[in-house]
């Protein structure tokens, strides 16, 4: 079914090998979204030679040349339009997008350093945090990216069993919580359940076809699927904006306490494409 209104989607992806599973799934997403009539933007971080290190070079016009305060300098650069051109361009794409898809291989239980560096530099003070100069008043459900959808598509070298609820690596949804809840929900994005492909280190043609078909189905539903039920800061569950009220999720602690409806699929729980259960290495 074609959408009633064309939307703009940004795909941020990080893998240096053009034949990788990650890159093949990027092509699939672009094809599906284009066929639906959407406008697709891409940030191919390796091809761009993205500067991953967040440092003083990001602030051409320093407020304080003697001591580097990232919050102070980031806020000044963003509010005074004196950020570096590459950061400004990526912010332009994010702000123009109705949805942002992040596609990457799981390296040491997180995103590649080049993608983390993209977030570090693009998520400026006054935009992704410190919104409206109000400190932490607008976070976790509100902020500069409110109303935008976000989706992670992660390629995992090892088997799904290792990332199951009692798997040795820990549940994927909890490993990715700092990204889904912190990086994305913090500035207001509606975060969809993560799409994961397992066993990518030794995936064969059949496994790749199955993964692409499952991914195609998810991309087609990008604007239909329900987001994860993360608890908003200002929705009443956090009376002091810091700690859950005693009557909310009583007796429950840890990451999952911050998801309102734990009966719904958490990140990574919907698709578990695993072509080779014996695979234990990162995506090639």
Image (spheres, rainbow, N blue to C red):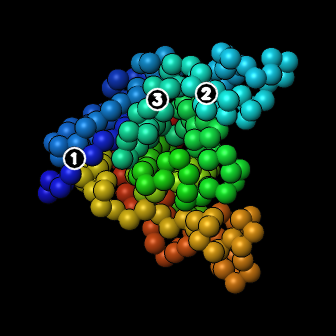
Direction from residue 87 to residue 233 in the image, left or right = right
Q: What element carries label 3?
A: helix
Residue located at (25% from left, 38% from top): 39
Quadrant in the rendering for residue 137: bottom right
Mark 3 and mark 2: Cα distance apart in space: 17 Å
Q: Which of marks 2 and 1 is nearer the N terminus?
A: 1
The residue singled out by tag 2 in the image is 80
Q: Is mark 2 on a helix, strand or loop?
A: loop
Residue 229 picture location, percent across and down: 50, 67
Looking at the image, is mark 3 or mark 2 nearer the viewer? 2
Residue 268 picture location, percent across and down: 46, 57
Q: Is mark 1 on a helix, strand or loop?
A: loop
Residue located at (50% from left, 21% from top): 86
Task: Tell me if I can see residue 65 in this picture.
Answer: yes
Looking at the image, is mark 2 or mark 1 nearer the viewer? 2
Q: Which of marks 1 and 3 is nearer the N terminus?
A: 1
């Amino acid at each position: 079914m074609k959408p009633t209104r064309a939307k703009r989607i940004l795909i941020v992806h990080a893998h240096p090998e053009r034949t990788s599973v990650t890159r093949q799934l990027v092509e699939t997403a672009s094809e599906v979204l284009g066929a639906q009539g959407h406008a697709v933007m891409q940030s191919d971080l390796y091809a761009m030679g993205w500067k991953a290190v967040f440092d003083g070079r990001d602030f051409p016009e320093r407020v304080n040349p003697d001591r580097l305060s990232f919050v102070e300098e980031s806020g000044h650069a963003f509010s005074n339009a004196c950020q570096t051109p590459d950061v400004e361009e990526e912010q332009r794409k994010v702000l123009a997008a109705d949805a942002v898809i992040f596609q990457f291989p799981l390296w040491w239980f997180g995103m590649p350093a080049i993608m983390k560096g993209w977030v570090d530099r693009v998520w400026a003070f006054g935009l992704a945090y410190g919104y409206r100069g109000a400190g932490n008043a607008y976070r976790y459900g509100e902020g500069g990216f409110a109303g935008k959808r976000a989706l992670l598509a992660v390629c995992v070298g090892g088997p799904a069993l290792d990332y199951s609820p009692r798997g040795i690596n820990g549940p994927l949804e909890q490993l990715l919580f700092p990204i889904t809840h912190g990086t994305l929900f913090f500035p207001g994005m509606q975060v969809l359940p993560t799409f994961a492909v397992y066993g990518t280190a030794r995936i064969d043609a059949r496994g790749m076809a199955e993964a692409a078909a499952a991914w195609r189905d998810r991309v087609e539903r990008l604007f239909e699927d329900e987001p994860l039920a993360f608890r908003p800061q200002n929705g009443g569950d956090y009376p002091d904006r810091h700690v859950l009220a005693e009557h909310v999720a009583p007796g429950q602690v840890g990451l999952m306490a911050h998801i309102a409806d734990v009966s719904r699929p958490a990140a990574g729980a919907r698709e578990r494409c695993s072509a080779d259960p014996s695979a234990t290495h990162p995506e090639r």
